[in-house]
Image: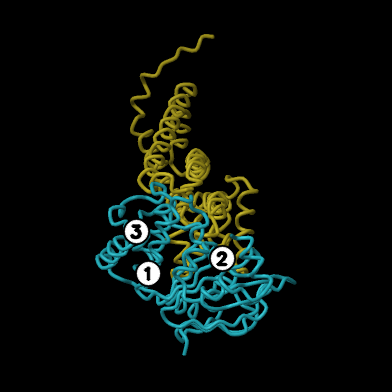
Amino acid sequence: MSLIEITEVKKRFGDNEVLKGINIDVEPGEVIAIIGKSGSGKSTLLRCINGLETIDEGSISVAGAQLLPDELHLKALRLKVGMIFQGFNLFPHLTAGRNVMLSQMVVRKTPKAEAEAMAKKMLERVGLGHKFDAYPDQLSGGQQQRVAIARALAMQPIALLCDEITSALDPELVNEVLAVVKELASEGMTLLMVTHEMRFARDVCSRVVFMHQGRVHEIGPPGEVFANPKTAELKQFLGVVH
Amino acid sequence: MNYAFDFGWLADYWPVLLKGIGITVELTLVGGVLGVSLGIACAWARALGPAWLKPVVAAYVEMIRNTPFLIQLFFVFFGLPALGLRMGELQAANLAMVINLGAYGCEIIRAGIQATPKGQFEAGASLGMSRIQTFWYVVLIPALQRIWPALSSQIVIVMLGSAAVSQIAAEDLTFAANFIQSRTFRAFETYFAATLIYLALAIVLRQLLRGLGWTIFPKRAAR
């Protein structure tokens, strides 16, 4: 059984069908890049996986936890998949350390001392142990995004969803975030990332998913997808990107 | 003009004024704490609560915001006994002030909640927090920080508005002033003193609320 099973998923916003039957199975430890033009449905797909968007048809399960729209099932699912956002979404009134501690204490009912130890460990892991007491607005974009990664990791998810996590960053800050993601990948974390970083996708990912008009248009190892695009749409997309 | 101004005698009535100040402060404290709490609950209900609750809270808020405080006070004190709800003048004053601030506070706090970026709710949800947990731990403090100056002003307005409770014989500062004036017929000195005391109370209250803001909210969390 695959870790993440996405089966015939359809999603409509009003009359606009943005996902037209998506099938992807993700094995443990896989790193998947989802690429495609804006409007192709890649962010929506990612947001469906942890229930930020509801699906109209099909099914999604993560390590046996089924995506169902009630709060109990959603919580069970969200404890298995963490999510990192384009805009970081750190809690502005809490220090970096508190940001990482909050959900452990509130959701997992972890005792404070234990949550604090975990927060220190996770911030160390993303290279920000010394920023435990800094507020988000005292950190650079790259640092904020790394805190957001630490916050998601502290919940000990078995997979991470990354929604264009470097798109809001200044160019010189992109690499520090990608370096953290790369390390997670090498440690065996299962990752699904919507990204425009083609070089990163080629170097780090095990498979690349090219989405076009709400469908998986091409899927395969990066060597194949980038070197030998089969469809005209992917050729054109890669041409545009290069 | 042959009115001889004389403030010296006021010292004899200082205990009366002091008692009045005590009642006004107590009414403001209880009204402020419970009123803001009610306001938070109502703001949650109107902004994020279940659909059936929204019109109920909306009706309460609009009823209070579109009627005079004095009438609300009279209704609580003189009207409710008809339903068997009999209470003392201080209880009635407290209740009326809580209900009044609750409604105005609701609208102010709701504005703060609705200015919350969508990403904050999504971050809370993706970490496994329930809607209520996300509201309580993530949304509320920055929302209050956004509207803290407006909410502080409203609390001061309610404190000043508490002068109306003298009309149901709650012995607040205004009641004390009226009492002194009726004994001495020295209206100028009496109400001049009451004016200064209210002014001082308002300034102190504002500073306290500002200081409270500094302790509750870290720098610039509202962004």
Front position in the image: B78 or B149: B149
**Placement of A56 over or under B122, stated as above or below:** below
Label 2 vs label 3, nearer the camera: 3
Q: Which mark is residue B49?
A: 2
Measured in 3D between alpha carbons, the distance from the residue under mark 1 to the one under mark 3, in whole angstroms, is 22 Å
- Subunit ID for the residue under disc 1: A
Q: Colour of chain B?
A: yellow
Q: Which chain is cyan?
A: A
* Dots 2 and 3 on the same chain: no
Q: Is residue A2 visible?
A: yes
* Dots 1 and 2 on the same chain: no
Residue placed under numbered mark 3 in the picture: A98
Residue B214 point in image, percent of width and height = 37, 43
Measured in 3D between alpha carbons, the distance from the residue under mark 1 to the one under mark 2, in whole angstroms, is 39 Å
Q: Is residue B165 visible?
A: no
- Subunit ID for the residue under disc 2: B
Q: Dots 2 and 3: beta carbons under 8 Å? A: no
Neighbourhood count class around disc 1 (C-alpha, 10 Å): few under 14, some 14–19, many 20 upward: some
Measured in 3D between alpha carbons, the distance from the residue under mark 2 to the one under mark 3, in whole angstroms, is 27 Å
Residue A197 point in image, percent of width and height = 51, 62
* Dots 1 and 3 on the same chain: yes
Q: Quadrant of the C terminus of chain A?
A: bottom right
Q: Which mark is residue A184?
A: 1
Label 1 vs label 3, nearer the camera: 1
